[in-house]
Amino acid sequence: MLAGAHRQAAEDIEKTILPLQMASYAARVVIEGAWGAAFHWIAFGCETKQESHARLGTFLRRQGEGKVAEWWEDLDRIRQGGWYGGSPEPERVQRALDLLERIHTWAIS
Amino acid sequence: MKPLNMNQEIPAWFDRATRALVEDIIDLLAERHPDLLAIILYGSAARHEERPLHAVHPSDVDLLAVFDSDDPLLDVHRGDSLSHTLGLAYTRHLDAPREVQVLFASKSFQEWDPTFIANVSHDGIILFKRGPLPTPFAA
């Protein structure tokens, strides 16, 4: 995907999940969406700041973006918790959205 | 680096670089987080069913870090600190050919699906432990 397509995908997902963040039935979908949007923001940031985005954590560290790698891996853990854990608590949903916001801000900075 | 806190050998089939990363993760988590109770290897690598390094997508190595905490939101409340600790290890081992994924758990495991914990208990290899472990990992 081109950088612009990644950005559009991220913004579309954000618009979809943000109105759902207070709905307990949608917790897993919000976290999954946050993970997907974060992936697209990192891809957008890499395409505009660097070159590629394969194997994200390692790739980001090789580019000197260790903090972004930590945010991404933290969000990835929350996502896995959504699959292997019980129903995600509101705090976990908010954590996913907080990490997404950090990645979003980094991507467009 | 010689691991400081290993209780059980990492399986022999691990490649050198991934082994070094796992050892560093264990050492850093144990040193920086005194309430770490255990680190358990689980999943395909624990069962020696991992996809090989020459596969298009080699299997990840999955670790579960258990803490002496009753907080089911431990991963949320300490996410920045724990992620930073892991990041130190990842940064030192960028050559590791396998991804090493670490999940966090309280000692009650209440935040995890019981089936997941039962599977970890069934297949898991305890690489590090400090003090008695909670059920179902107690000897």
Image (spheres, rainbow, N blue to C red):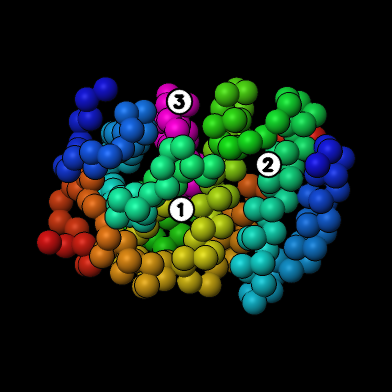
Left or right: where A30 falls relative to B25: right
Left or right: where B98 falls relative to A33: left
Q: Residues within 10 Å of mark 3 (few under 14, many from 20)?
A: few
Q: Main secondary structure of the magenta part?
A: helix
Q: Which amino acid lies under the numbered mark 1 shown in the image of this protein?
A: Asp
What residue sits 43% from the left and 30% below the top? B96
| Residue ID for mark 2 | A102
Cα separation, mark 3 vs mark 2, equals: 27 Å
Q: Tell me if residue B10 comes above or below residue A37 in the rendering.
A: above
Callout 2 secondary element: helix
Please tell me the numbered disc located at residue B59.
none
Q: Residues within 10 Å of mark 2 (few under 14, many from 20)?
A: some
Left or right: where A78 falls relative to B12: right
Q: Which residues are magenta?
A: B77-98
Chain letter of disc 3 in the image = B
Cα separation, mark 2 vs mark 1, equals: 17 Å
Mark 3 and mark 2 residues within 8 Å of each other at the beta carbon = no
Please tell me the numbered disc located at residue B95.
3
Quarter of the image where one finds residue B32 = top left
What residue sits 78% from the left and 57% below the top? A13
Q: Are the numbered discs 2 and 1 placed on the same chain, yes or no? A: no
| Residue ID for mark 1 | B75
